[in-house]
Image (spheres, helix red, strand yellow):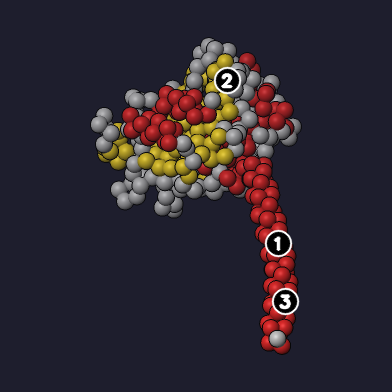
Amino acid sequence: MKRKKINIALTICVLVLGVSLTFYFRRQFGRQGQALANTQMQLKLTKKQLDIQRAKVNKNDIDDRVVNELTTPEQAYLKQELLDNNFSGTILIVRHNHVIYQGGRGYANSEQFTTPKTTYQIGSVQKSLTAALVMKAVENGQLKLTDHLSRFYPQIPKANQITLQMMLDMRSGLFETSAPKVVQTDAQRLQFAIKHLQVKKIGQHAYSPVNYVLLAGLLEQATHKSYNDLMKQQIITPLGVQAFNFMPNFSDPQHATAYAYQKNGAYGAEIEDPAYIYTRELGTGNLYATASSLYQVEEAIVQGKVFKSKYLQQLRHTNNGQYSGGVYNYRDYFTSHGIEAGFESHVQMSQNGESGIILLSNQYKSTPSLVTMSKQIYQQLLV
């Protein structure tokens, strides 16, 4: 009887202890579960905040990383476009401030494939930067778009009938009848241009690079600084862009070599550019860049980071595809194209700079057209 009572007492103790322990552990695990849930919620909020911050500070997103965030159908489309056009170079696609694709195709030289770090000559795309420097001088009160060329170069025939706006828009009627084939200083290059000028139909559009050579010269007069120094002090350094500078680019192992194009897509002979090309193309085509650094600069121009946004409308005052301020301007986007020493470049970007495509190639070809391919990709992936 006594043993039975002891067993009952032990059983009751075990039950009480079990209930107590169950309650205790449930309470503890409940707290831990709630803590875990709170942590997960905090992580979600932090990720959301980071996504928002990344969207705001999109410069950090546009760099020289390899990126592929295209959908499977988009990847198939892009791969076929590049294949059909025998593209050799680097391509960058930005959609709503976010890089959705960046990569290389083909060879940069005999030893390396092209990558987002590969640099290329950008050719006439540089004219949009020269135009930006002109507008910076306008903002600073050093120039007016209504200024006549005669203010700076009175010796040029009919210079009193030609405004800076006309030169920016290629409506000056100025043509250069010869091109220098020796290395020159800026002053020598400008004197050569003046000596070999013809003036044809003033006011009628006719693409002529000498307009931007002379714009570089009058910038030097108005600011008392060299064109190279202006580019570095007002664009390259303030924007903090990397792999973006003046040719020659012998010190950069990532610089691409240009090759002649063969119809089957094979690489032809290496194209060597003589040193005088770099001084001849003053203001018009002697810069090199990566796809990402070029995007950052073009984006900065339209987003008011080089000069105030209110001046952009004066600079790019057309919206029907006509040339103005170094680009072909449309209502919703603008384009810029360059060819230099076997290199070809093309930019197509939305007017707000939030979406766009950069194509840089080390193999120029007239057919198939890089410009056409760029427009097709833009229409397919960004519109």
First reached walking from the N terminus: tag 2 or tag 1: 1
Picture layout, residue 81 above or below residue 240: above
Look at the numbered disc 1 and give the secondary structure of its residue: helix
Which numbered circle lies on residue 12? 3
* Quadrant of the image containing the N terminus: bottom right
Question: Which residue position is annotated with label 2?
Answer: 330
Three-letter amino acid code of the residue under disc 2: Tyr
Mark 2: secondary structure? strand
In percent of width and height, residue 281 lies at 48, 34
Q: Amino acid at mark 1?
A: Gly
User: Residue 281 versus residue 10: which sits nearer the camera?
Assistant: 10
Can you tell which of label 3 and label 1 is closer to the viewer?
A: 3
The residue where tag 1 is placed is 30
Drawn side of residue 19 relative to residue 182, left or right: right
| Mark before the other along the chain sequence, 2 or 3 | 3
Instruction: Name the image quarter holding the C terminus.
Output: top right
Amino acid at the residue labelled 3: Ile
Q: Is residue 8 above or below residue 335?
A: below
Please name the residue shown 38% across and 45% down the image: 114
Quick one: label 3, few (<14), some, or many (20+) residues within 10 Å?
few
Residue 169, image x, y percentages: 58, 21
Quick one: 248 or 307, which is closer to the camera? 307
- Residue 167 visible in the snapshot: no
Q: Nearer the viewer, mark 2 or mark 1?
A: 1
CA distance for labels 2 and 1 = 61 Å
